[in-house]
Amino acid sequence: MNAIKHLPLVAALLLAGCATALPPLPAEPAPPAQFKETGRWTVAAPAEAQDRGAWWQAFGDPVLSSLVERAAQANTQVQEAVARVAQARALVRSAYADRLPQVGAGAGVGRGAGANSVSGPRPATLWQAGVDLAYEPDLFGRASGRQDAASLDAQAREAVLQSTRQAGQAETAQAYLSLRALDVELALVRDT
């Protein structure tokens, strides 16, 4: 009866003993000589969150510039992205604040029964004050990990904001330039 009870354990140990590790991955091949360059290489920084500038001004059209600026101010998607960036930055500040010592203070006044006298309990004013100090050491990296995650999320939302702005600018410029092309075609048809 005892042997039947331990049968699943024996089976698990037997299966674990038969398991083999995966073979090591082969080393990366060296790049061909024609792809090697002499000199110093630098790692390019991601540019998603960088401002792309006023690229539409290269057309030199004041009407286009005015339309793009007006569209940017009225674009609700950009306004939502700005709000999300502000929210993400607030989460970064909150995650940073969690790593600092927390200090709290409180005070209160109340009316209650005081000391007993011959005629009964006498009312008294009760004063209370207190200070709390709390600090959680980040032994396992939970707080720093949360701060890093919030910081990366804020960077991603800033990149989305810039992409949303650029998409709105591109849509406005594309619609305006298409309209101008149709105006030129219409003038050409009228002239012929």
Image: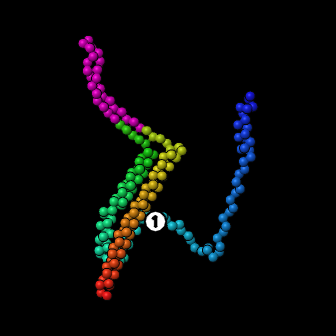
Q: In the depicted view, which residue is nearer to us: 174 or 34?
A: 174
Q: Quarter-wise, where is residue 112 in the image?
A: top left
- The magenta segment is 106-133
Query: In the rendered image of this protein, does residue 162 appear above or below residue 33?
Result: above
Q: Is residue 117 magenta?
A: yes
Three-letter residue code for mark 1: Ala
Q: Is residue 53 visible?
A: no
Query: In the rendered image of this protein, does residue 95 appear above or below residue 126?
Result: below
Q: Quarter-wise, where is residue 111 in the image?
A: top left
Query: For the point 57% across and 73% down, which residue is it?
Result: 39
Colour scheme of the rendered structure: rainbow
Residue 176 x %, y %: 33, 73
Q: In the depicted view, which residue is nearer to us: 98 or 135?
A: 98
Query: For the point 71% across and 40% down, which residue is it?
Result: 12
Q: In the depicted view, which residue is nearer to us: 2 or 128?
A: 2
Assign the C terminus to one quadrant of the image: bottom left
Q: Is residue 48 visible?
A: yes
Total marks placed: 1
Query: For the point 61% across and 74% down, which residue is it?
Result: 35
Crowding around mark 1 (Cα neighbors within 10 Å: few <14, some 14 to 19, many 20+) is few
Query: In the rendered image of this protein, does residue 179 appear above or below residue 83?
Result: below
Q: Quarter-wise, where is residue 79 in the image?
A: bottom left
Residue pointed to by mark 1: 47
Whether residue 150 sits left or right of residue 27 in the image: it is left
Task: Specify the farthest residue to the left.
Answer: 119
